[in-house]
Amino acid sequence: MSTDQDLVTDGLLTHPYAVYDRLRDTAPVHRVTGPDGSPAWLVTRYDDVREALANPLLSLDKRHALPGGYKGFALPPALDANLLNMDPPDHTRIRRLVGRAFTTRRVEQLRAPIRRTADHLLDALSTNGGPHGGTDLIAAYAAPLPITVICDLLGFFTQLLADKRKEPADDLLSDLIAVRDESGSTGNDRAGSDRTGSDRLSEDELMSLAFLILFAGYENTVQLIGTAVLALLQHPDQLVALRADPTRLPAAVEEFVRYDGPALLAIRRFPLEDVTISDVTVPAGETVLLSLAAANRDPRRFPDADRLDLGRDATGHLALGHGIHYCLGAPLARLETEIALAALLERLPDLKLDGDPGDLRWRPSLRARGLLALPVTY
């Protein structure tokens, strides 16, 4: 363990990968001060992060946190009963229930609608910018694409819960409502106080699931599309190779998410008892932050890890988690990114970065990695 340092002033907001490279070598389990001034432990090596992601002694339930520790952002109770704050058995129960609705078939049905949305957005670029235009690709493409997909997937929210209960449609929200109602839960079951061990969703759990799918599905996909496009524009040899063989796109998405994924950190965890990580003992109840970004650039697991290599076997990356908390929306994020990039490669053959890469602005966040804007010409 090394001395405590302030995460915000330690360069992680501006040059996260350089900081993580140093920490992996000098202090793989590092005592830090979080963005709210509270203490936490930062884990940076691949093997340690992978093991910790699947460790049942590291809880996501904030009730196990010590007072004064870093707990992440707070949500209203109706939105806080989500999978990012749950351990088994509630986590197991809800993942099993949602799995009935969030199937491979459901995601694959979105392939054609996603491509239509992508083409519509690119049509607008051509109309507004002419054959040789310029735009902010985040605002014009990366952001509206996933929010449109998620809205179509969910159908949409609070009043619609009641509407879709009366008149179900062929969408995920209707499926989730059916799972809740068919399992025997009643409209008065707000808190779900007797839900442990039973196959039911409380009303708060249903709302929280819809929120989580909206929030995570939108935010992470926007960021991944943006960083993937930037990576291609900064590596023209890789761009040429991918244009020459678009069938490599699914594997390329795995390298994009390993190389510069949307989540720098996994959701915070709290040891149920003292745990040892890389010879460092972390006391029960303190906050553990697992750096997905540092793990995915660990040269012990990925040789020449700081290089984008679309021919690399990037399977085993931790960008989408590992173990029982593996990202529920991973198939959708992969599909959206694949289609978004395919449409760009086909429709904008002269896409270029507009300006100096050093002038790009990034989100000022320790948790999420994403561009505020991506100016391009085409």
Image: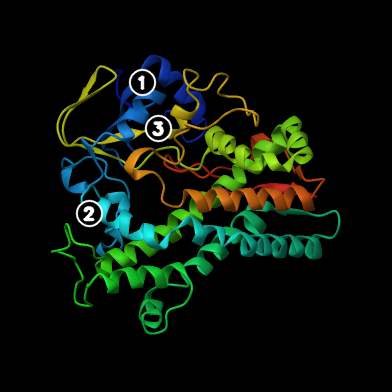
Q: Is residue 358 above or below residue 193?
A: above
Q: Position of residue 369 (x, y in %)?
A: 50, 41
Indicate which disc residue 113 carries. none
User: Looking at this view, is 372 or 271 the one in front?
Assistant: 271
Indicate which disc residue 28 carries. 1
Among the two numbered marks 3 and 2 on one chain, the one whose residue lies closer to the N terminus? 2
User: Looking at this view, is 5 or 253 the one in front?
Assistant: 253
Report the Cα–Cα distance between label 1 and label 2: 32 Å
Say which element carries label 1: loop
Report the Cα–Cα distance between label 3 and label 2: 25 Å
Where does label 3 land, which residue?
291
Q: Residue at x 23, y 62 (%)?
A: 199
Q: Amino acid at mark 2?
A: Asp
Q: Residues within 10 Å of mark 1 (few under 14, many from 20)?
A: many
Indicate which disc residue 90 carries. 2
275 lies left or right of 46: left
Q: Position of residue 66 (x, y in %)?
A: 16, 40
Q: Residue at x 39, y 64 (%)?
A: 210
Q: Amino acid at mark 3?
A: Ser
Quarter holding the N terminus is top left
Say which element carries label 3: loop
Question: How many marks are shown on the rendered structure?
Answer: 3
Q: Position of residue 101 (x, y in %)?
A: 40, 63
Say which element carries label 2: helix
Image quadrant assignment for residue 65:
top left
Among the two numbered marks 1 and 2 on one chain, the one whose residue lies closer to the N terminus? 1
267 lies left or right of 172: left
User: Looking at this view, is 55 or 93 the one in front?
Assistant: 93
Q: Amino acid at mark 1?
A: Pro
